[in-house]
Image: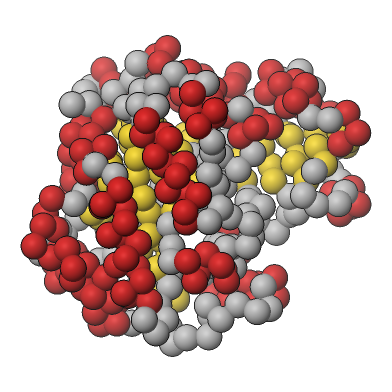
Amino acid sequence: MKIVFDEKAVNFRLTNEILKRAHPSSINSLDVEKSHEGEKQVEEPVVFITPYKGAFVKKCPGTKHYLCCGYIIFHFAENCPLGCSYCILQAYFNKPGFRIWANLIEDGLTSLHSFLKERTEKGELTRLGTGEFTDSLVFEALTGVARTLIEFWIETDPFAVLELKTKTAPSSAFYSELPSDKRIIFAWSVNTERIIEKEEKHTASLKARFQSAEEALKHGFSLAFHFDPIILYEGGEAEYSKVLEEILNRFPLNRIAWISLGMLRFPPELKEVAPKNFPKTKVYADEFIRGLDQKYRYFIDRRIKAYKKILEPFKKYLNEIPLYFCMEGKRVWQEVLGKPFHTSEEVAKLLDSYAKRTCFS
């Protein structure tokens, strides 16, 4: 791994912490903003450390015409090295490597503190996560960002939960070195073994993810699981049901903040980029329709049928499971879960109730 730091990043605390952890032979310096040419000369995997001029705290971009959960993002980095063929980041970021913002502690935490303080004083619960533009933990050993945020949570005591979403599998030693707090949710994106093997190149196995979740639970943290994206294939619904069954059998419901379900969806650009990056993928060789947000999706009748098949074994106690849909419309909510939601605010209130039950009781 190469570490490339922008000359403008040298005086920031996170830069110096990363450089202390990195092997001296891996460290390079250049002006990241000016030198796309320089970037191409550095072999991957590579971590670029550079100051960020944008907003660290922002609302999840969601998507028009579908129901969003009101998630807040702490934007600490961009891009991911895990090599998932369906990853939407391929269409968003055309620069090589992983970018982490050098001014995260000085500027990022200052803006986060102001944001959370205002909402806490108003009695408004915040659900915040770091896994929108990268994996929350993939470079944790190098950056320590998750640890920094958890310590920040303990110090500032906000009326908020922090979700750290990953496809990695931290060990027991990692959790034991952190201050435990139920407001910290370690979350895993999960899929069937078949999809993990064929489409998630550098991720941890499903078994390893579940073992890591057990360790997080032992050390006093809350859990979450995300079936997103669900990728349809012959016999796939039954395999997704088995994964969900294992989660429900293995982990107590009162320690699971939520479980999300979301079908494969992607912008038109991804259909051009991804097959070039992953020539063996079969993900895009299916029937799709342009949704109301102009992203490609499975036909809605097919999505509803698949959701129902996946959840059929749990039909009798669906109301006990903290489920929600990611970027689906009111018809899916109504026909699959029997919840007549019409607005994103209703979905947000549901997830707030899940968070309060798991993380504050």
Q: Residue at x 52, y 21 (%)?
A: 177
Give the image's coloring scheme: secondary structure
Q: Quadrant of the C terminus?
A: top left
| Quarter of the N terminus within the rendering | top right
Q: Is residue 200 above or below residue 6?
A: below
Q: Nearer the viewer, residue 144 or 316?
A: 316
Residue 305 percent coordinates (x, y): 24, 79
Where is residue 244? Give x, y as percent: 30, 59
- Find residue 286 and report its horizontal and vertical position in percent: 47, 86
Residue 32 appearing in the image:
no
Residue 233 horizontal/vertical position (percent): 42, 81
Residue nearest the observer in this picture, 100 or 46? 46
Q: Quadrant of residue 314?
A: bottom left
Work out whether residue 10 or residue 144 is closer to the camera in this orientation and state it.
144
What residue sits 26% from the left and 52% below the top? Answer: 249
Q: Is residue 175 above or below residue 236?
A: above
Q: Nearer the viewer, residue 202 or 26?
A: 202
In the visual, does 93 lie left or right of 119? right
What is the count of numbered marks?
0
Looking at the image, which residue is at 53% across and 56% down? 205
The residue at the point 31 percent across, 53 percent down is 247
Residue 302 higher or lower than 346, as above or below: below
Horizontal side, residue 343 vs residue 69: left or right: left
Q: Is residue 3 visible?
A: yes
Location of residue 358 (image quadrant) = top left
Left or right: where 194 falls relative to 246: right
Image side of residue 299 versus residue 110, left or right: left
